[in-house]
Image (spheres, rainbow, N blue to C red):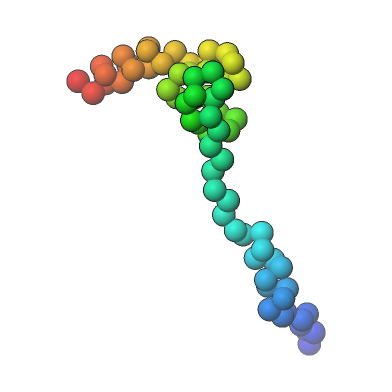
C-alpha cells in the first residue's frame, strides 16, 4: 500500500507562487528617445547598445514590395 505524502494548500501555494506572469520591461533609448523592449534592437531606429544593427529603410522597402 502506498503512503501518500501530505499535500496541503500551503505546498500548492508555494509551488504556484512561481507561476505569476511578469510584465514586459520597456526602456527608452537615451539618444533617440524611442521606446523598445530590453535586450532587443529598436525596430524604429535599428540600433542596439549604440550600434546600428538593422537596416530599417531596407526592411521598409522589402515590406512595401511584399504588400504589392
Residue at (66, 59) in percent of width and height: 18
Q: Name the quarter where the C terminus is drawn.
A: top left
Query: Could you tell me which residue is drawn at 37 percent across and 17 percent down?
Result: 59
Residue 33 in the image, given as x and y percentages of width and height: 49, 24
Q: Residue furthest toward the bottom?
A: 1
Q: Where is residue 45 in the image (x, y as percent from the top left)?
A: 45, 18
Q: Which residue lies furthest to the left in this view?
A: 68
Determine whether 11 is above or below 53 in the image.
below
Does residue 23 lie above or below 50 as drawn?
below
At 69% from the left edge and 66% from the top edge, which residue is drawn? 15
- Give the residue displayed 78% in from the left and 80% down from the top: 5
Quadrant of residue 62 in the image? Answer: top left
For the N terminus, the quadrant is bottom right
Q: Is residue 46 left or right of residue 12?
A: left
Question: Does residue 58 appear to the left or right of 64 in the view shown?
Answer: right
Which sits in the foreground, 37 or 19?
37
Up the image or down, 39 lies above or below 64; here it is: below
Which is more toward the observer, 13 or 4? 13
Quarter of the rendering containing residue 17 = bottom right
Total of numbered circles in the picture?
0
Residue 51's spot in the image, x, y percent?
Answer: 57, 13
Amino acid at each position: 500500500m502506498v503512503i501518500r505524502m501530505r499535500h496541503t494548500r500551503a505546498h500548492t501555494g508555494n509551488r504556484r507562487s512561481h507561476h505569476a506572469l511578469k510584465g514586459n520591461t520597456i526602456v527608452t533609448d537615451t539618444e533617440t528617445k524611442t521606446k523598445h523592449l530590453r535586450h532587443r534592437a529598436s525596430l524604429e531606429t535599428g540600433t542596439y547598445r549604440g550600434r546600428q544593427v538593422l537596416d530599417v529603410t531596407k526592411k521598409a522597402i522589402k515590406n512595401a514590395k511584399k504588400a504589392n
